[in-house]
Image (cartoon, rainbow, N blue to C red):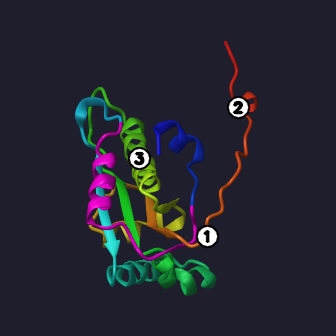
């Protein structure tokens, strides 16, 4: 797949199954994450790979977070199942570092770019992925359970696997709606 085709056909594949990325595919995904823009060469990221039984552990973390933080009963009941939606999840974390020339937003954006790069690398290898955030990306209890610092930010959960269905999505937006000239 060439780069232009990759960029113009990228999509989220929310229904994923086995197989997850194999070790060679994962190595490429990991390398892509580390090639994103990084002002100051701070490498303001951390990644946690969750697969196999560790998905149940993450589900327990979600469940305890939902109970502790008094979420709605529906959220509590479904928390344990969320990590089972794909055979692999990569948790992407922005590890903010106080820096005179590199503001927090740039560091968080760099971590966000890593998620897109990983998804693109998976897609280019015939895999599927979906970038999710939501309540559990903001939860102080989840951050604590993952041993993150207060100033760290979970920028996303990248669910990876093999798409269950091949549903190519047509473009939703027209460039002229979002681009103008000065």
Cα separation between marks 1 and 3: 22 Å
Q: Residue at x 44, y 51 (%)?
A: 124
Q: Which residues are magenta?
A: 13-36
Among the two numbered marks 1 and 2 on one chain, the one whose residue lies closer to the N terminus: 1
Q: Which mark is residue 117?
A: 3
* Few, some or many residues within 10 Å of mark 1 (<14, 14–19, 20+): few
4 horizontally vs 45: left or right: right
Q: Is residue 129 magenta?
A: no
The reply to whether the C-beta atoms of the residues labelled 2 and 3 are less than 8 Å apart is no
Q: x, y percentage for residue 47?
A: 30, 58
Report the residue marked by disc 2: 175
Residue 151 can be seen, yes or no: no
Q: Which mark is residue 173?
A: none
Cα separation between marks 2 and 3: 22 Å
* Few, some or many residues within 10 Å of mark 3 (<14, 14–19, 20+): many
Among the two numbered marks 1 and 3 on one chain, the one whose residue lies closer to the N terminus: 3
Among the two numbered marks 2 and 3 on one chain, the one whose residue lies closer to the N terminus: 3
Judge by depth and name the residue closer to the eye, 100 or 95.
Answer: 95
Q: Is residue 3 above or below residue 158?
A: above
**Outermost residue toward the top in this view:** 182
Q: Is residue 60 above or below residue 106?
A: below
Tell me the element at label 2. helix
166 horizontally vs 67: left or right: right
Judge by depth and name the residue closer to the eye, 72 or 136.
Answer: 136
Judge by depth and name the residue closer to the eye, 88 or 100.
Answer: 88
Q: Residue at x 33, y 48 (%)?
A: 33
Report the residue marked by disc 1: 165
Tell me the element at label 1. loop
4 horizontally vs 60: left or right: right
Q: Residue at x 49, y 61 (%)?
A: 129
Cα separation between marks 1 and 2: 28 Å
Which image quarter is the C terminus in? top right
């Amino acid at each position: 797949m060439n780069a232009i085709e990759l960029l113009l056909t990228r999509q989220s594949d929310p229904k994923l199954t086995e197989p997850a990325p194999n070790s060679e595919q994962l190595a490429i995904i990991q390398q892509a994450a580390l090639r994103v823009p990084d002002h100051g060469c701070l490498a303001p990221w951390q990644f946690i790979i969750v697969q196999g039984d560790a998905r149940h552990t993450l589900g327990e973390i979600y469940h305890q977070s939902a109970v502790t933080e008094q979420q709605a009963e529906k959220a509590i009941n479904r928390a344990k199942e969320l990590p089972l939606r794909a055979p692999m999840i990569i948790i992407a974390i922005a590890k903010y570092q106080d820096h005179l020339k590199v503001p927090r937003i740039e560091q968080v954006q760099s971590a966000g770019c890593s998620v897109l790069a990983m998804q693109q690398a998976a897609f280019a290898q015939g895999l599927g992925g979906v970038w999710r955030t939501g309540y559990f990306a903001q939860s102080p209890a989840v951050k604590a359970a993952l041993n993150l610092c207060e100033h760290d930010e979970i920028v996303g959960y990248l669910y990876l696997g093999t798409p269950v269905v091949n549903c190519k999505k047509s473009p939703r937006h027209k460039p002229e709606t979002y681009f103008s000239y000065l």
